Amino acid sequence: MNISARNQIKGVVTEIKPGVVTARVILDIGGGNRLSSVITMESVEDLKLKPGDTVYAIIKSTEVMIGKD
């Protein structure tokens, strides 16, 4: 995955809390730290996200996006 954002944090999906339009994706980023991001349900489905997946939190300005190889 090539992306211009330099603030990338690798983590493992521990939980996905789905809603009607959005979902909260919670990552274990190591050292007892967790990070969460709210993304669309469509993105969860497109990325086929599930607990146990290794993903990247991509931080650009005030946004946190999720990327998956």
Image (spheres, rainbow, N blue to C red):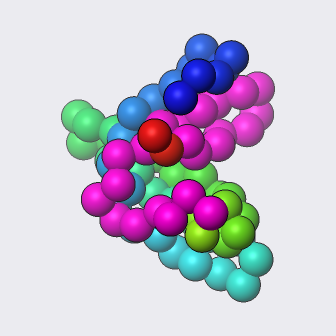
| Residue 69 in the figure: left or right of residue 38 | left
Looking at this rendering, what residue extends furthest in the left direction?
A: 31
Q: Which residues are magenta?
A: 46-67
User: Tag count in the figure?
Assistant: 0
> Is 64 a magenta residue?
yes
> Is 53 a magenta residue?
yes
Question: As displayed, is residue 6 above or below residue 17?
Answer: above
For the point 40% across and 50% down, the residue is 27
Residue 34 shows in this picture: no
Residue 60 shows in this picture: yes
For the point 40% across and 67% down, the residue is 50
| Residue 34 in the figure: left or right of residue 61 | left
Question: As displayed, is residue 10 above or below residue 24?
Answer: above
For the point 59% across and 22% down, the residue is 2
Question: As displayed, is residue 18 above or below residue 59?
Answer: below
Question: As displayed, is residue 25 above or below residue 16?
Answer: above
For the point 63% across and 30% down, the residue is 59
- Whole-percent x and y of residue 67? 55, 42
- Whole-percent x and y of residue 46? 62, 63
Q: Nearer the viewer, residue 2 or 61?
A: 2
- Whole-percent x and y of residue 26? 45, 57
Looking at the rendering, which quadrant does residue 43 occupy?
bottom right
| Residue 28 in the figure: left or right of residue 40 | left
Q: Nearer the viewer, residue 31 or 57?
A: 57
